[in-house]
Image (tube, grey):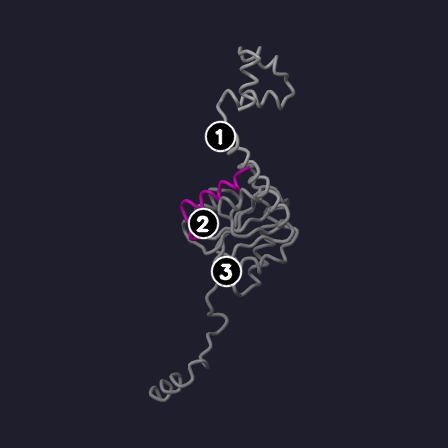
Amino acid sequence: AVRYFGTFFRKHPRTVILPKNLAPQISVVMVEDNPDLAQTVREFLSGEPKFVVLGDAREEKAFQKLVAEHLPELALIDIGLSHSRSGLELLGWLRKEYPVVKPVIMTVNEGDVLEAYQLGARGYVLKSHLESLSATLLKVNAGNLIIPPEVGTLFISQVAAATELWKKSLELERFSEREREILLLLKEGVSREIIGERLNISFFTVRRHVQN
């Protein structure tokens, strides 16, 4: 019988199907300070056979302990925890201590998008659109970077604003410290004569710096 089944499986390898209840699941840990929402998310993912929730925390230290104990594949992080920046700080902590864990941000608003992605977020889910959570987690686990349509425009605008600031900083670097002082005063509408008095330099010196 052993010889028969061995020959059968070699001839028909694709007929060997792993039962659904034995299929590998994607491990998830979560930090969410709203217990009702945390329960909703946990129940939602529990109904998805592809995921297993290894634990959910209400604050940062408990979450860090869960990550250290289980080393999950995915981490769901509420960006609006009780401390205003604690969600962002957890992203930085994950990137430094456990870079293999892929973080997905949950929030009620669209703020801090750019900074969250700069700190390592791989996905972003609005709490008002949790129906997209399962698909987002699957894509992030597969190595994709997910930006939902709801925040795409804001993300692009923030990138554009950051790029503009970077360009302006490069432009300022070519000026001397004195020239930057004069430019800032001119921007405030201060006349060249008053600038000379404030900086204790002559009107002609101010004009020379402006011409440079």
Q: In the displayed structure, does residue 14 sit left or right of residue 161? A: left
Q: Earlier in the sequence, mark 3 or mark 2?
A: 3
Residue at image point 42% right, 50% down:
99
For label 2, the residue is 66
Residue at numbered disc 3: 52
If the image is split into quadrants, where does the N terminus sit? bottom left
- Which residue appears at 44% of the width and 43% of the height? 93
User: CA separation, marks 1 and 2?
Assistant: 45 Å
Front-most of residues 162 and 92: 162
**Is 186 situated left or right of 50 in this image?**
right
The amino acid sitting under disc 3 is Val
The x and y percentages for residue 116 are 53, 44
Would you name the residue on which mark 1 appears?
173
Disc 2 element: helix
Measure the alpha-carbon separation of dots 3 and 2: 14 Å
Report the magenta residues as a range: 85-100
The residue lying at 60 percent from left, 20 percent from top is 185
Chief SS of the magenta region? helix
Q: Does 79 sit above or below residue 21?
A: above
